[in-house]
Image: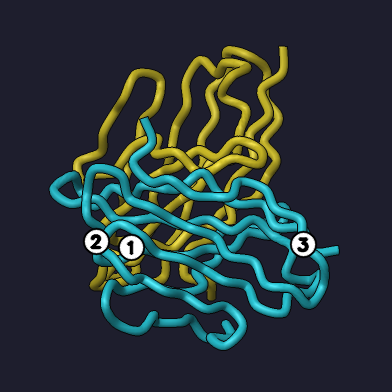
Chain colours: A yellow, B cyan
Amino acid sequence: RKEVEQDPGPFNVPEGATVAFNCTYSNSASQSFFWYRQDCRKEPKLLMSVYSSGNEDGRFTAQLNRASQYISLLIRDSKLSDSATYLCVVNKGGSYIPTFGRGTSLIVHP
Amino acid sequence: GAVVSQHPSRVICKSGTSVKIECRSLDFQATTMFWYRQFPKQSLMLMATSNEGSKATYEQGVEKDKFLINHASLTLSTLTVTSAHPEDSSFYICSAPGFGEGNTIYFGEGSWLTVV
């Protein structure tokens, strides 16, 4: 089993749609969780950290389920500019070395 | 503005030559930096952890004699791809962990290497 697994997609949705991504991780000792956004041929940029209580930032909501070892990202009212690859990042169990999922591709169309 | 600067952003080299990529932390000291490689439509794969003043820690399967890492100062880590081959063509990216900010990771802009 890979350390961090994501459905690669692509998720192809119309503008205004709500879309959700899941990410599972294998190391139960992992402590830090993030969602990053990566545009084509660019470096990843932090979208949001994921906290145990769940957190929201505008149209984006992140959830953590430690029991099932997965995190989720919900995007409401999708915009064309949301089209990108969303990377799930989990720290390497017990340390701060980040491990990346393969990324989930989102395409928002008019 | 960028907190980690990576250079060059693009480089083309001939097979058999060596290429050096620099990663600098701006306005903060980074005792640790991470080097990743990303092939098209693949995830970022950790190659090695660069440690200031000591040897880098390489991930399994990464040839340390081929990918030389030097972290000579608290603001600079370099990755040298030696005797490059076309299969080394990839996107190389460095990062440094932030402190006091929930372990935020700062990325360099990445370097596209093409070996011809």
Query: Residue at the spot x=70%, y=53% of the render?
Result: B11
Query: Residue at the spot x=45%, y=42% of the render?
Result: A36
Which label lies toward us, 3 or 1? 3
Q: Is residue A22 above or below residue B94?
A: above
For the image, the number of numbered tags is 3
Letter of the chain that mark 3 sits on in the rendering: B
Give me the C-alpha separation between circle 2 and circle 3. 40 Å
SS at badge 3: strand
Q: How packed is label 2: few (under 14 Cα within 10 Å), some, or many (20 or more)? A: some
The quadrant the N terminus of chain B occupies is: top left
Dot label at residue B13: 3
**What residue is disc 1 on?**
A91
**What residue is disc 2 on?**
A31
Residues at marks 2 and 1, common chain? yes
Letter of the chain that mark 1 sits on in the rendering: A
SS at badge 2: loop
Asked if residue B67 lies left or right of residue B88, the reply is left
Asked if residue B28 lies left or right of residue B25, the reply is left
Q: How packed is label 1: few (under 14 Cα within 10 Å), some, or many (20 or more)? A: many
Asked if residue B91 lies left or right of residue B31, the reply is right
Q: Residue furthest right?
A: B116
Query: Residue at the spot x=31%, y=24% of the render?
Result: A57
Which mark is first along the chain, 1 or 2?
2
